[in-house]
Image (cartoon, rainbow, N blue to C red):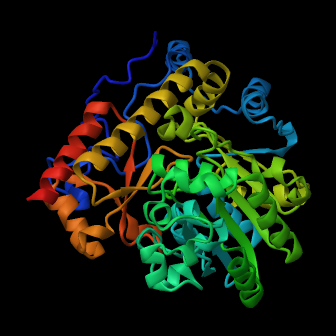
Amino acid sequence: MAKYDFDKLIDRHGTGSEKFDFMERNGKPADTLPLWVADMDFRVAEPIIDAIRKACDHGIFGYTSPMYGYYEAASGWFSKRFGWTPEKDWLVTTPGVVFAFNMAVQAFTQPGDAVIIQPPVYYPFFNAINANGRKLIESPLKLTDTQCCANGPEESCENKSAECCSNESEECCENKSAECCANGSEECCENKSAECCANKSEECCSNQSQECCENKQASAKNPYSPQYEMDLEDFEKKIVDNDVKLFIMCSPHNPVGRVWTRDELRAVADICIKHNVYIVADEIHCDFTWEDNKHTMFLDACPEAKDIAISCTAPSKTFNLAGLQASNIWIPNEKLRKSFSETLSRTGFFALNQMGIIACEAAYSQGEEWFEECKEYIYANYEFMKSFIAERLPMLKVMPLQGTYLAWVDFSALGMNADEVDDLICNKAKLWLDTGKIFGQGGENYQRFVLACPRAMLEEALIRLEKAIKE
């Protein structure tokens, strides 16, 4: 039986909540339902509250720094859950991951230097580059569709839409004529009957490999299965052509929900090592991965990159502690760590908030039970959202979610431009979502939903959206 009640609706109005208390300031109707900013609408774990209450009862709130138990709690969490144990000397604390990657831009590059990112991506990446006077370079992720893999080799799926693959147009079919593919003639189908080829039934697998059959069955269960990938060829070309000095990576990727594999991380590390590009890995969503997807800490996947890379982590997403502003930045290389720390010092920052320190240590040492229940609840929200949209709003497409608690939804089938979709959502549905266009190239037809909320709140949002679209 669950110990925590994630269905409970807690009124956050009047608390200074960025999500709930500033609608009109941000141009939203007063009765808007917000699912935009990535914090949770759940009460945090009791051990965290107890630790903060104990500090309040003590009654002294002087200057405070983390003690050894803080490091033990944080490193112990990563060791247990990821098999990666960062060293104590690597740790530099900051009041946030966004603050940290801004500091990294200043510490590791000079004004005018090129910094590369992979849109659509977390929008503060853009500001960290532009506001600090650096040159923005974009290497967009590419969207592939594994649906057509059920009918052919995986490589044939790249850059082909689901519509192309399902209709088997001449371009999709490559060397086969459109007529042949449509009719499923024996010449086209080789050893398969025309009926089998046309219907693409499992019977079709009888003359194919087991791998083919497995792909067909997977496709039947999940007919819409696109996936974002890094365009490594474009990534390296942009680095060379623009003399890029720094790469800010999102892992897991916000907003598209990809969890990068160890091989993908190593591939991008190899390119950066080859061309002397520093790497800032934003791993704040690392604890939220789903099904068989497993997050690999960048410095664990790529130890050979330890002299050019830093890892940005925090308990804020995992335990809903964003307002307490405590983040842990792991910097193995002493020279980089010194440069980063000196940049911090120039801002006037020298210590975390006392409550942030206390909450972080309590969360990592005593919050696992709460987190596991929370994670299970959030994934059930994702499943609920997928079912609702499939049954009642089939023109929308929910992207597969490998990591984060953020749903990335494709609205392109509505035939509206991005501004028209924003108007529909804001003024008709009375919802506040993150519009995809703020995430850069490739995000224009999408909206981002936060799933870390009570089910009733998510259901209300989807009902509002359904009504707005159907009216």
Viewer-side residue, 177 vs 401:
177
Q: Position of residue 189 (x, y in %)?
A: 57, 71
Residue placed farthest to the top in the image? 1
Where residue 117 sits, quadrant-wise, is bottom right
Q: Nearer the viewer, residue 61 or 148?
A: 148
**5 lies above or below 40:** above
**Left or right for 446, reference 395:** right
221 displayed left or right of 109: left
Q: Residue at x 49, y 16 (%)?
A: 46
Q: Which residue does the image show at 75% across and 46% down from the upper left? A: 297
Q: Position of residue 247 (x, y in %)?
A: 70, 69
Query: How many labels, in total?
Result: 0
- Residue 272 in the image, given as x and y percentages of width and height: 81, 71
Q: Quadrant of residue 143?
A: bottom right
Above or below: residue 175 compared with residue 433: below
Up-down: is 395 above or below 431?
below
User: In the current view of this chain or complex, which residue is farthest to the left?
Assistant: 471
Q: Position of residue 228 (x, y in %)?
A: 57, 63
Instruction: Decide which of 409, 360 is in the foreground and name it.
Output: 409
Taking the view exactly as shown, the residue that stands out farthest to the bottom is 241
Residue 112, by quadrant, is bottom right
- The quadrant of the rendering that contains the C terminus is bottom left
Residue at screen point 43% across, 69% down: 443
Let me know if residue 347 appears in the view.
no
Q: Who's the residue at 25% across and 32% down the image? A: 456
Q: Is residue 313 visible?
A: yes
